[in-house]
């Protein structure tokens, strides 16, 4: 958030589409991952930020350049010049925290997604922007930090699994987007486990007020919803052919991606409704417990009202009270008070107030 606010302040007054020069501030040098492949050949290597970018693309091969970091503004400028990336796209890549979207810029497809991971220690959802630029024969992916959810795609490329080695760059862009969306299901499973644990505590255990935990989980679901909801619109545009750079063959796969996004949204909404119901159940449980306590206290107070009245009469300091001189006065009064209490208890039980 601090980096984002700094970018906002330094971007004020600049030309739209400008890349802001950022100080390194001790950031590690970026090591880019390169895949170059077709159905019969595969090349995989690591590139330093200072390596030449001129000989990256080869005819009849798909290039995937994976860049784990956007803090190196010099490298970003070189990538933009080398691949002819639109300045607005470059600004969106560097200026993280954007809304997920899918846009077309000439012969390039630009996908902006939010990669979600679950931090089990902090019990929080962590969001990272992923930008994907797809052109003729190449895909460039940008992440904020090293570490991603693209290992299944790397494995399919390396081992020649599936159809990725036989398809074009638009299918690779779909595969990366699909890996991001598939990871949402894993995060939702973790959130579901948190919800089940919380549900057990709320409904079947006597413990501290769970309101803070419920609101915390609801906040994480809201973060996930903000990341997923705009992606439905982007996937809809891709599957309906509104982005010409996506072939008709790949549009079918984006249709499946759209279905997954809708399923995730439905799951999120269901969990949010369940959280509301869980909080309502807790409030009802607390209310019922309070009512039970108040009922018992009311019955006890009601029983003692006539007993207090009788004790008050014989606690008066008058000299002439005939009962005070009776030898059996005390046990008779105590017996009478006992009968009154028992009679009231029987009456309450008959009325099913006990």
Image: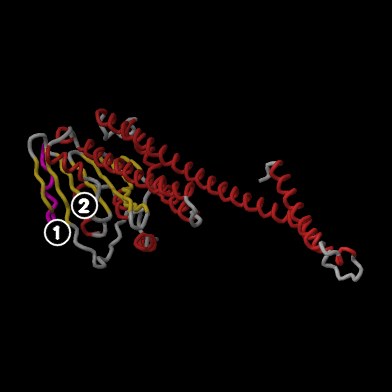
**Where is mark 2, residue-wise?**
67
Q: Is residue 59 magenta?
A: yes
Residue at the right extreme of this rendering: 320
Q: Vertically, is 48 above or below 138?
A: below
**Where is mark 1, residue-wise?**
50
Rendered image quadrant of residue 170: top left
For residue 267, the mark is none
Kind of element beneath mark 2? strand
What residue lies at 68% left-to-right and 42% top-to-bottom?
352
Q: Is 317 situated left or right of 115 in this image? A: right
- Percent x, y of residue 147: 23, 53
Frontmost of labels 1 and 2 is: 2
Badge 2 density bin: few <14, some 14–19, many ≥20, Cα 10 Å: many
Q: Vertically, is 23 above or below 146?
A: below
Badge 1 density bin: few <14, some 14–19, many ≥20, Cα 10 Å: few
Of residue 150 and residue 296, the one placed in the foreground of this image is: 296
Q: Is 242 situated left or right of 158 in this image? A: right
Rendered image quadrant of residue 349: top right
Q: What secondary structure characterizes most of the magenta part? A: loop
Q: Which residues are magenta?
A: 47-60
Q: Is 43 situated left or right of 258 in this image? A: left
What residue lies at 76% left-to-right and 59% top-to-bottom?
334
- Percent x, y of residue 331: 77, 60
Mark closer to the chain start, 1 or 2: 1
Asked whether residue 331 is in view, the answer is yes
What residue lies at 37% left-to-right and 54% top-to-bottom?
124
Q: Quadrant of the N terminus?
A: bottom left
- Percent x, y of residue 346: 71, 45
Residue at the left extreme of this rendering: 41
């Amino acid at each position: 958030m601090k980096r984002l606010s700094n970018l906002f302040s330094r971007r004020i007054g600049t030309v739209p589409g400008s890349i802001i020069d950022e100080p390194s501030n001790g950031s590690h040098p970026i090591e880019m991952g390169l895949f170059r492949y077709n159905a019969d050949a595969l090349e995989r290597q690591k590139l330093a930020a200072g390596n030449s970018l001129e000989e990256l693309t080869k005819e009849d091969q798909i290039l995937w350049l994976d860049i784990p970091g956007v803090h190196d503004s010099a490298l970003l400028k070189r990538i933009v010049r080398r691949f002819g990336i639109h300045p607005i796209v470059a600004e969106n890549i560097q200026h993280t925290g954007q809304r997920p979207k899918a846009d077309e810029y000439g012969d390039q497809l630009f996908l902006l997604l939010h990669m979600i991971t679950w931090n089990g220690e902090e019990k929080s959802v962590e969001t990272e922007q992923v930008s994907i630029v797809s052109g003729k024969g190449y895909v460039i992916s940008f992440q904020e930090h090293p570490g991603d959810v693209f290992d299944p795609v790397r494995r399919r490329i390396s081992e020649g699994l599936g159809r990725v080695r036989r398809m074009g760059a638009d299918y690779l862009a779909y595969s990366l987007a699909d890996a991001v969306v598939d990871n949402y299901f894993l995060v939702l499973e973790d959130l579901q486990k948190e919800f089940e644990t919380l549900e057990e505590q709320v409904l079947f255990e006597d413990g501290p007020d769970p309101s803070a935990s419920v609101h915390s989980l609801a906040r994480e679901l809201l973060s996930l919803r903000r990341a997923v909801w705009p992606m439905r619109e982007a996937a809809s545009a891709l599957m309906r052919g509104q982005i010409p750079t996506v072939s008709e063959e790949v549009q079918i796969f984006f249709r499946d991606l759209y279905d997954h996004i809708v399923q995730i949204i439905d799951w999120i909404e269901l969990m949010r409704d369940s959280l509301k119901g869980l909080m309502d159940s807790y409030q009802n449980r607390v209310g019922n417990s309070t009512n039970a306590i108040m009922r018992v206290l009311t019955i006890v107070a009601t029983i003692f009202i006539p007993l207090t009245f009788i004790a008050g009469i014989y606690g008066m300091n008058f000299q002439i009270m005939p009962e005070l001189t009776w030898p059996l006065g005390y046990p008779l009064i105590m017996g009478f008070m006992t009968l009154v209490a028992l009679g009231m208890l029987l009456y309450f039980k008959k009325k099913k107030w006990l």
